[in-house]
């Protein structure tokens, strides 16, 4: 049975969101001097990568093309993060930036879930896992404020 277009769209949204999380962390990490926060971010980057890989595996199983972040979008994201941390590289500021980005991704994922209501249980489950992961991340980041 072929993958439904709603499943494809939802898996791509999961990949887009996970890749965005990975890029934000990759951009912030070189500016982090605090070992506990750096260790925390490395662990989160790994979790984003695992979520991205799970969505990619589902897409490959069904011979669907997975999501790839465009060069312009990646450059814009990294530029935005660099601009945001140009004058303030405190742990509190970076945690606030991560909370803001995670909140955006939560909203985007809820929108995708609502829009792709015909998606099957596998894509919906992974999207819900991503939502739980982002919510937990926001809660954990509050400790660094």
Image (cartoon, grey):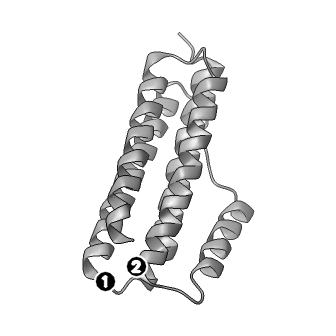
Q: Where is residue 137 in the image (x, y as percent from the top left)?
A: 38, 54
Please name the residue shown 32% across and 58% down the image: 140
The quadrant of the picture occupied by the C terminus is bottom left
Farthest residue, direction right: 72
Q: Residue at x 49, y 64 (%)?
A: 98
In the figure, residue 108 lies in which quadrant?
top right
Above or below for 91 versus 7: below
Residue for badge 1: 34
Kindly identify which numbered label has been placed on residue 136: none
Query: Relative to 20, does residue 112 appear above or below in the rendering?
Result: above
The spot of residue 48 in percent (x, y) is: 41, 52
User: Residue beneath label 2, please?
Assistant: 91
Task: Tell me if I can see residue 24 in this picture.
Answer: yes
Q: Where is residue 42 in the image (x, y as percent from the top left)?
A: 33, 67
Distance CA(mark 1)–CA(mark 2): 8 Å
Q: Are marks 1 and 2 in contact (CB under 8 Å)?
A: yes
């Amino acid at each position: 049975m072929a993958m439904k277009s709603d499943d494809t769209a939802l898996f791509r949204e999961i990949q887009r969101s996970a890749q965005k999380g990975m890029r934000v962390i990759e951009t912030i990490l070189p500016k982090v001097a605090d070992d506990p926060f750096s260790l925390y971010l490395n662990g989160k980057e790994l979790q984003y990568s695992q979520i991205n890989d799970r969505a990619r595996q589902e897409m490959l199983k069904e011979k669907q093309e997975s999501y790839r972040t465009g060069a312009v979008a990646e450059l814009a994201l990294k530029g935005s993060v660099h601009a945001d941390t140009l004058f303030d590289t405190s742990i509190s500021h970076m945690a606030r930036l991560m909370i803001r980005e995670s909140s955006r991704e939560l909203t985007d994922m809820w929108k995708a879930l609502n829009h792709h209501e015909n998606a099957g249980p596998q894509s919906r489950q992974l999207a819900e896992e991503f939502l739980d992961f982002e919510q937990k991340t926001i809660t954990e980041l509050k400790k660094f404020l």
